[in-house]
Amino acid sequence: VPELPEVEIVRRDLGRLYLGARLERLSISGIRTVRRHAPELLSRLEGQILVDVGRHGKYLLLRWGDGEVLVMHLRMSGQLLAAEAGAPSMVHTHAVFSFETAGELHFVDPRTFGELFVAGGAAEEGPRTARDGACPSNGALARPAELAHLGPDALEATPAHLAVTLAGRRAPVKSLLVDQRVVAGIGNIYADEICSDARVRPDRAGGSLGRSEVGRLAAATRSVLDAAIVARGSTLGDQQYRDVLGETGLYQLQHKVYGRAGLPCGTCGRPIERARMGAKSAYFCPRCQR
DNA sequence: CGATTATCCTGTGCGC
DNA sequence: TGCGCACAGGATAATC
């Protein structure tokens, strides 16, 4: 459930609570959570200081004093929750970060789809291209090789990029929006909300969109994600999403279409429809969205 | 090659 | 009250 806005809130919370703190111990109890490489690799983070918390799409990037980057993804049911030192763990806690002075951080994930791994920890360092080494001095967190397949972060993507990636595609607009290779960070909820804001039906073929429609889609991507971040993300009925301090988001109160099948559209009053797109459902207003 | 479908997993809520 | 089952969906592998 967590998508770009929720992950961005978690990123900010982590920075506020743990930046500059020294990791005393990292204990892993869930094997599946660290499935990318040997769990022992994570022990190299112990003793290091958290120096930066970044994000690309739905991935969190924690950079440590020795230059290591810990990559985390919450997937469907993952939560990162602050806890007092020595506090008992909830069920489905798969990793506990114990900081020297900042307390603990618990990685809780009932469905175990989430994961964490040290970037570059599993593979040999590949040959560096000129691009890779071009500007390491600007302090920006370089994207790990494991995330090379991702498109630009949805907040960084330009309208031109969106136009190019939609051109000629037969796949539905919504499928392209949630395709992390096109833009990174958009999931099922925000794809529906973005299509609603852009007044474009989610099942329209990407290549069939006109210039102004692509423009509206790009603008909607920005405005919807920005507004969702201001509202600290969406916490749905399942109460799944929580920020690091356990608080819910409020953006669900501003949802125009997601989960609102049969309810009247706020603009025209027609009932919101729910359509099956593959295994997932898409919500839209049949009158306002074309 | 691009588009669709199955898979991973557990908690929840529904119908019977 | 309880049981079975569909559903939720992010990413990836497999398949059409």
Image (cartoon, coloured by chain):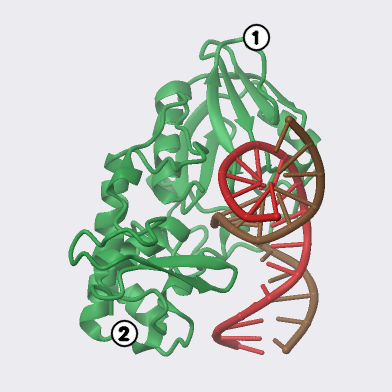
Chain colours: A green, B red, C brown
Residues at marks 1 and 2, CA–CA distance in whole angstroms: 55 Å
Pointer 2 indicates a residue of which chain?
A
User: Can residue A212 be seen from the camera position used here?
Assistant: yes
Q: Nearer the viewer, mark 1 or mark 2?
A: 2
Q: Is residue A138 left or right of residue A94?
A: left
- Quarter assignment of residue B6: bottom right
Residue to which mark 2 is pinned: A209
Residue at 42%, 90% in the rendered image = A168
Instruction: Give the amino acid at mark 2.
Output: Leu
The front one of A212 and A262 is A262
Residue at 35%, 74% in the rendered image = A162
Instruction: Give the amino acid at mark 1.
Output: Gly
Residue to which mark 1 is pinned: A86
Quadrant (top left/top right/bottom left/bottom right) for the C terminus of chain A: bottom left
**Which percent across, then down, holds residue A277?**
52, 73
At mark 2, the secondary structure is: loop
At mark 1, the secondary structure is: loop
User: Can residue A187 be seen from the camera position used here?
Assistant: no
Residue at 47%, 28% in the rendered image = A244
**Which percent across, then down, holds residue A52?**
46, 34
- Quarter assignment of residue A96: top right
Pointer 1 indicates a residue of which chain?
A
Q: Considering only vertical position in the picture, is A170 above or below A188? A: below
Q: How crowded is mark 2: few (under 14 residues within 10 Å), some or many (20 or more)?
A: many
Q: Considering only vertical position in the picture, is A240 above or below A21? A: below
**Which percent across, then down, holds residue A70?**
60, 39
| Label 1 or label 2, whichever comes before in sequence order | 1
- Quarter assignment of residue A13: top left
